[in-house]
Amino acid sequence: MIAVPPYVQALLAALGDAGFAAYPVGGCVRDSLMGRAPADWDLCTAAAPEQTETALAGYRFVETGLKHGTVTVLTGDGPVEITTFRTDGVYLDHRRPAHVTFVPSLREDLARRDFTVNAMALGPDGQVVDPFGGQADLAAGIIRCVGDPDRRFGEDALRILRALRFAAKLDFTIDPATAASAVQNRALLDDIARERVFAELKGLLTGPGAGRVLRDYAPVIFQMIPELAAGEGFDQRNPHHIHDIWTHSTMAVDAAPPETVLRLTMLLHDVGKPTCFFTDEKGVGHFYGHGERGAEMADGILHRLRCDNDTRERVCLLIQNHDICPPQTPRAMRRLLAKVGEDGVRQLIACWRADCADRVDAILATDTPWGTLIGTAERILAELLAGPAPCFSVKSLAVNGRDIMALGVPEGPQVGRVLGALFDAVTDGEVPNEKAALLEMALVISRKMD
Ligand code: ATP
Ligand code: MG
């Protein structure tokens, strides 16, 4: 029996008292049946939006979805979307319906929903309303369109990506007919707003089934990011790499912690490789500069996908540095910290680990295993952070601008130059981050500048 939280029960009861059927529907029913806590509770109802608002007098509403029959009710326990039973009218451009039609029956409302596992409602006595076999598909771990897949993807091409996203997130497979149709209809994705495409891509990447879905639906992924296609089947001709670039990238995605930045980084980290490829006189493949090149390409890709700036900049920074050797000395680590910050170094370590998950160094013993190099870098980082007065930016120097001016340096750009020089010296281990030592050095530096 699904436990409906009291704040949702209160809404159902108020609508019921006003004479309107109302049901929890979609994701909350699916998640509850899987034994997961739903992220949010959506309701559907026979009440028209204004009837919903009347029945729920006393609540506050957000009316942004009114055109589609959705009223968002603000409860003390969070917002609840309540949508009038509807079918979708004619679809334009494989996107959104031109208009929606309110209908009297729950069944018709369920029929317009995308997948059988999302097309279930919860009746008042706790029974699951499931006209399309959603419970059976849930038990078998299958994503299947409600109705004919070609028609459903033709109506709204975003559903192609939603199918992949749910398959990755729930670690489900996609029913063969739905899967074939998703691949077949992939060009329709070109009509979908990039923001919506990117939102689904992020959901896909952070799911436990991400790598498998990326591999199984590569043509759909390449439709969104054509730059990745060159890596498919690309023989790296290098003893470290047993997989082609694309397969390796999908495995690296799985090996990274399920965070958007890290998973996007691993998806795109080798996108620059095919254009940087050359073989040496022994026929071994190399990719010099592919970090830099990949960061440039990723920047273009993420701009196109309307990725937010913070995520884009961070992903590009990580890609740019993903193929440097993990610092093996405190001095090298301090330089890296100055460049990418403490969070950046931690993320790079996660990327290095993910990147070597399918490498064979240890087996071939041709080189110091990457795992050892990364472990050393991690140890050095921990030691530096635990050490006295860690200093990885000008701000954390033991002296500030006022101290420098007190030495007689005039206010202005020269103060910044002295601080910068001190920071470089601390980074290189030439001077400890201690006030007395730094002031002494500042005096020498400022005299030289005069
Ligand atoms: P999540 O946990 O990711 O939010 P969800 O199932 O709640 O999963 P939503 O995108 O919030 O997904 O959509 C809520 C419900 O609306 C879905 O369960 C589905 O029934 C329906 N739905 C959403 N988008 C579509 C669509 N593009 N086509 C058809 N039905 C859709
Ligand atoms: Mg939802």
Image (cartoon, rainbow, N blue to C red):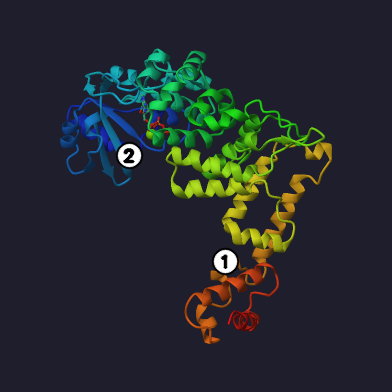
Please state the horizontal and vertical placement of residue 209, each as a whole percent of the image: 56, 30
Find numbered disc 1 in the image and state the secondary structure of the residue it sits on.
loop
Rendering quarter of residue 279 = top right
Q: Nearer the viewer, residue 54 or 16?
A: 54
Q: Give the residue at x 49% y 13%.
A: 177
Q: Quadrant of ligand 2?
A: top left
Please state the horizontal and vertical placement of residue 139, each as a whole percent of the image: 50, 21
Disc 2 residue: CB within 8 Å of ligand 2: no
Residue 258 in sight: no
Q: Quadrant of the N terminus?
A: top left
For disc 1, the marked residue is: 393
Query: Taking 301 as reference, is 428 left or right?
Result: right
Please state the horizontal and vertical placement of residue 428, each as a whole percent of the image: 69, 67
For disc 2, the marked residue is: 6
Which residue type does callout 2 highlight? Pro
Q: Give the residue at x 41% y 34%.
A: 194
Q: How many marks?
A: 2
Rendering quarter of residue 266 = top right
Query: Taking 384 as reference, is 219 left or right?
Result: left
